[in-house]
Image (tube, rainbow, N blue to C red):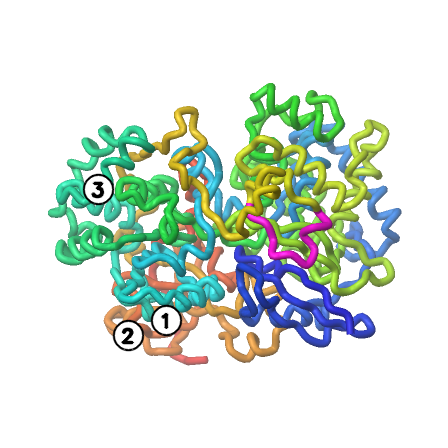
Amino acid sequence: MKKTQSTCNYCALACNLDFYTENEEIVKIIPTPGYPVNDGFSCIKGLRLNRQHQEFKPDPRPRIKQEDGSFTYVTWEDGLKDTAAKLKEIRAKYGPESIAGISTGQLTMEEMALFGHVMRTYLKGNVDGNTRLCMATSVVAHKQAFGFDAPPYTLKDVELSDTIILIGANPVVAHPVFWGRIRANKIAGKKVIAIDPRMSETAKKADIHYKLKAKADLKLMYILANLLIEKGWLDEKYIEAHTQKFAEYQAFLKDYPLSRANETGLTEGEIEELAQLIHAGKNVSFWWTMGVNQGYEAVRTAQAIINLALMTGNMGRPGTGANSLTGQCNAMGSRLFSNTTGLYGGGEYDNQTRREVVGTALGIDPSWLPEKPTLPYNVIIEKINAGEIKALWVAATNPIHSWTNSDTFKEAMSKLELLIVQDIYDDTKTSASADVYLPVVPGTKKEGTLINTERRLSPMRPALTLGENEKTDYQVFYQMGQALGMEAENLLHGWETPAKAFNLMAKCSANMPCDFTGVTYAELENSKGVQWPYTPAHKKSNTPDERRLYEDGQYYTPTKKANFVFEAPVENPVALCDEFPLLLNTGRGTVGQWHTQTRTREILEVQDAVERMAYVLMHPQKASDLNVKNKDIVYVSSMNGHSEKFEVIVSQFVNENELYAPMHYIEVNRLTPSVYDAYSKEPSYKSTPVRIDKVEKESV
């Protein structure tokens, strides 16, 4: 029996697993003992990675849509050659910005880098990704506050914190291994605090739940910060030595007295209690995720959390930090090494020094490198609908389901001259719409590197070998580059394998905050992973494998000081009204469900445990007012003009005028609006005005 240590490619923790195989079959999966992230534990998704491609495995050949709507299968050589010819034809006819791509943090760092190289360096198109749907907010918040997209923590910090504050985060469901680490915290008297408009699974298990009004989190953070100032509960030495713009922030906060508590849904006493808990904590850690990130003023909300950590000196010490929990397994790798919103390694496109460094690392003239950031996801869709983008390449994601106001994406697909979809399944809503479908293998047959939420580089190594005609995402990107003619421009030299691509990205990272020049591709295999930064000096000094940033109080801004960033709250662009008086919140449903349920549908235990029909949680009083019974079928209509059928689950765990629906059902994002944060362009999934439009009396 062969054992292969690899990384789970579902969520941001990137747990390591030991795959035991015989005769090209995975016979058992054991979470890797001693791995710093999960140390022998995994959720059901990782433990059932052997199920992928068991029931819904596509033909391994490219599939091409014919003029009559039928499909035909072709050889890889013909499929890539013909698709490349169509891409070049569209570029010649309409210009390079007529081509775009959508990717995801489910790809490895090397795959993301190569996709960006093909699409951005060579074709000069635009590529954005699913990280725009989950982590763009935190990226912008980090850059503006810290000077770089550099989350400060190690996951070990949650075991060292005596006051753990979870804001818009539900790790019991979304990050169960992280919740396990919270449970492993043995500090006497520790407090786990959940700030959430819903009595989530995490809120139920927390010591204290502050059930604020939906999207009142920014006001709450400002009122809380002002109260801490009034009480004198600050770390003035830290503020003076390591931050800037605090005086301006202090003046700004005078407009947020405790008397405004009623605007948050909390009482003055509750906010005073929260302030006291922060003050009493020796090591306070703040953790946020999609409940903050996916909002119309999300960046400022994330920065208000960062401000709390800075002003109380809860940064850079064990058990502290303003800590964003990432969504996808390689969101960090895609953020820094995808060639989309910044040069490889996180540099800016207009920085000539960085352009020279990256060009030298890649062995190309810097003039090949993109001149500006990619168009964001929402603008790509808008430009397709406007007729300006004609070809779209979608890799490893299902945006007909996952995109906000998702029928706008469906509409866009009908206007394209060429839709390429590259996925492990041929029957997703997006794959089924493709003009060209490129089948690829799941992570159990791939190699590369994932960078998790705590900046840890983790190895993905194949437990199974490729079958006849099967290809990895990396191979498809590389061979498409060949078909496009990139070899003639010497643009594929050094990209031949994931290992070589890793070396290129390491060179690009040199002297940047994410420097990992001390890591080798071979050394990652069967390792504990490595957190960046990790230079040759780190290796020489035997740096520990769990560590945080900013321990010396030095940030990545020009002054080495962290910025207090703030702005007055704005009203929801699609506020509640008489016609749409209820607010729809969305999020995860169960531990076993993942995104659009394409992979987790193959896990029998998950299918046995989840609802088949889209459902919505409704408060008992609201159900009574509307004469709705548990399990009744209702139509939920949103301000974007759509109406979808849901089963009602009557639940006291939502506020009276709020509803909650798991995002895993396609009906949900047909209702969410085309509203985005002004800075990150992340969609506002959490606050859609809706109404109950019609009630059918029969039950399911």
Which of marks 1 and 2 precedes in the sequence?
A: 2
Give me the disc on residue 627: 2
The residues bearing labels 2 and 3 have C-alpha atoms spaced at a distance of 51 Å
Residue 506 at x, y percent in the picture: 66, 38
Residues marked 2 and 1 touching at CB (< 8 Å) = yes
Q: Going by the image, does 618 lie left or right of 547?
A: left
Toward which corner of the image does residue 585 lie, by quadrant?
bottom left
Q: Residue furthest front?
A: 541
Amino acid beneath label 3? Leu
Q: Looking at the image, tell me whether mark 1 or mark 3 is earlier in sequence order.
A: 3
Q: Are marks 2 and 3 in contact (CB under 8 Å)?
A: no
Q: Residues within 10 Å of mark 2 (few under 14, many from 20)?
A: few
Classify mark 1: helix, strand or loop: strand
Question: Is residue 195 placed above or below 541 in the rendered structure?
Answer: below
Checking the image for residue 196, the label placed there is none
Above or below: residue 420 compared with residue 270 = above
* Real-space Cα separation, disc 1 to disc 3, in angstroms: 53 Å
Residue at 41% across / 55% down in the picture?
A: 157
N-terminal of the pair, mark 2 or mark 3, is: 3
Please report the residue visible at 11 percent of the width from the left and 47 percent of the height from the top.
259
Please state which of residues 452 and 517 is positioned toward the viewer in this rendering.
517
Q: Does the rendering let one see residue 674?
A: no
Q: Give the magenta part as a residue range.
A: 521-531
**Labelled disc at residue 234:** 3
Image: 636 above or below 489: below
